[in-house]
Image (tube, rainbow, N blue to C red):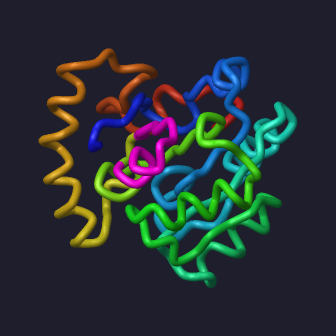
């Protein structure tokens, strides 16, 4: 339940076209530290990614535990559906997103940066979960505490499975992101 189906260094490294070819048609994204730094508005690259995914044929929904004041402006800038106060990792928000997207369980990808909320909830709902490295290192105290616990699962996950994409390295998060998203 705690292991993602796959892991990438960034949401911007995921080969979404390959997933589309495999029959995935909907993507549920976490927002903070997955697509943009915590609390940041939609930026040029997140809007470009969203636009490209829609052109490919994906339907997109944002699922966040944040309130409407944070989530709605972000989703509106992306012209996408959203669920705020999602209650992750509980299944309710994930299942609601599937209804909004009019997608079957086997057609849904979930992309997020936290094991104990994002991946756990996506796995519980039966979605294909993708863990990405957090964009920002400076985080709220409780998120830092969760990440310390997550390191144990990530260590064993990485030991048991092949890592995909490029991990962020010492030169920073931006190091291995395709040029079109910089």
Q: Is residue 169 above or below residue 116?
A: above
* Closer-to-camera residue (33/29): 29
Q: Position of residue 109 (x, y in %)?
A: 58, 39
Q: Name the foreground residue: 123 vs 79.
A: 123
Give the left or right position of residue 176, taking residue 104 as reference: left
Image quadrant occupied by the C terminus: top right
Magenta region includes residue 126: yes
Residue lying at 62% horizontally and 40% vertically, measured from the top left: 108
> What segment carries the magenta color?
120-132
- Decide: is 38 above or below 104: below
Q: Quadrant of residue 76?
A: bottom right
Question: Which image quadrant is residue 69 in?
Answer: bottom right
Q: Residue furthest right?
A: 55
Based on the picture, tell me whether residue 56 belongs to the magenta stretch.
no
Please provide percent x and percent y for residue 54: 82, 41
Residue at horizontal 83 percent and vertical 35 percent from the top: 57
Screen quadrant of the N terminus: top left
Q: Is residue 12 left or right of residue 60?
A: left
């Amino acid at each position: 339940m705690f292991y993602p189906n796959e892991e990438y260094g960034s949401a911007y490294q995921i080969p979404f076209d390959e997933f589309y070819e495999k029959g995935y048609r909907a993507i549920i994204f976490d927002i903070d530290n997955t697509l943009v730094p915590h609390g940041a508005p939609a930026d040029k690259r997140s809007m470009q990614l969203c636009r490209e995914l829609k052109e490919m044929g994906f339907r997109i929904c944002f699922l966040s535990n944040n309130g409407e004041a944070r989530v709605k402006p972000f989703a509106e800038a992306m012209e996408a559906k959203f669920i705020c106060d999602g209650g992750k990792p509980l299944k309710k928000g994930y299942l609601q997103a599937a209804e909004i997207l009019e997608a079957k369980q086997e057609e849904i990808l979930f992309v997020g940066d936290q094991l104990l909320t994002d991946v756990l909830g996506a796995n519980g709902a039966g979605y294909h979960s993708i863990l990405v490295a957090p964009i920002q290192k400076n985080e709220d105290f409780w998120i830092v505490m969760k990440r310390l616990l997550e390191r144990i699962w990530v260590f064993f996950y990485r030991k048991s499975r092949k890592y995909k994409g490029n991990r962020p390295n010492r030169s920073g998060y931006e190091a291995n992101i395709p040029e079109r998203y910089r």
